[in-house]
Image (cartoon, helix red, strand yellow):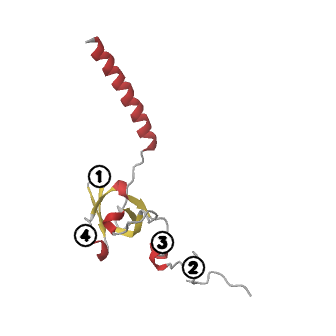
């Protein structure tokens, strides 16, 4: 019984140590309806199989909050095979206006690893 008590004490100290690490790194994420978020997806499910592809894909709109940790998202037709409900750990908030985000697929890179810049808008003029 003495050895069992010693082992139980060791388990309690290990558990309290792990909880102290967890409490420092934990952050409660709460999103509202109509917020824009990035979705973290597995590359095999989206169809891309190369190493350097993006982990967070195009911004999505939150339709509904389900429980404490799940959200229902509005997905585009090309991602229709995925389930629409995701855990909060797979979401990342979009900072800024989501209409200003340019998809990476529209940027074409040449063989020399260069690209042509296309002006979207003129921000300032001086006479």
- The answer to whether any part of residue 62 appears in the image is no
Report the front residue among 67 and 4: 4
Lateral position of residue 50 relative to residue 7, left or right: right
Task: Report which residue position mark 1 lands on.
Answer: 68
- Position of residue 104 relative to residue 90, above or below, is below
Q: CA distance from mark 2 to mark 1?
A: 44 Å
Q: Which residue is mark 2?
A: 115
Q: Which mark is residue 91?
A: none
As helix, strand or loop, the secondary structure at mark 1 comes to: loop
| Mark nearer the N terminus (3 vs 2) | 3
State the SS at label 2. loop
The image quarter in which residue 70 lies: bottom left
Q: Residues within 10 Å of mark 4 (few under 14, many from 20)?
A: few
Residue in front for this viewpoint, 52 or 13: 52
Secondary structure category for the residue under label 4: loop
Q: CA distance from mark 3 to mark 1?
A: 26 Å
Do the residues under discs 1 and 4 have CB atoms within 8 angstroms?
no
**Residue at x 36% of width, y 57% of height:** 90
**Badge 4 vs badge 3, beta-carbon distance below 8 Å:** no
Q: Residue 12: x, y in percent?
A: 35, 25
Which mark's residue is nearer the viewer, 4 or 3? Answer: 4
Mark positioned earlier in the residue sequence (2 or 4): 4
Q: Position of residue 20 (x, y in %)?
A: 43, 34
Q: Which residue is mark 3?
A: 97
**In this picture, residue 101 sits left or right of residue 16:** right
Residue 40: name its quadrant.
bottom left
Percent across and percent down for residue 25 are 45, 44
Q: Which residue is mark 4?
A: 81
At numbered mark 3, what does the secondary structure look like: helix, strand or loop? loop
Using the numbered discs, state the Cα–Cα distance from disc 3 to disc 2 in whole angstroms: 25 Å
Q: Gap in Å between the C-alphas at discs 4 and 3? A: 27 Å
Say whether disc 4 or disc 3 marks the residue closer to the N-terminus.
4
């Amino acid at each position: 019984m003495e050895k069992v008590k010693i082992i139980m004490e060791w388990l309690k100290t290990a558990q309290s140590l792990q909880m102290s690490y967890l409490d420092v790194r934990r952050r409660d994420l709460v999103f509202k309806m109509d917020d824009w978020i990035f979705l973290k997806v597995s590359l095999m499910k989206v169809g891309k199989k190369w190493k350097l592809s993006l982990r967070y894909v195009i911004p999505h709109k939150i339709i509904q909050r389900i429980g404490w940790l799940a959200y229902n998202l509005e997905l585009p037709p090309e991602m229709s095979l995925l389930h629409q409900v995701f855990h909060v750990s797979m979401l990342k908030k979009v900072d800024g206006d989501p209409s200003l985000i340019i998809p990476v697929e529209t940027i074409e890179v040449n063989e020399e690893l260069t690209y042509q810049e296309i002006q979207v808008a003129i921000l300032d003029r001086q006479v």
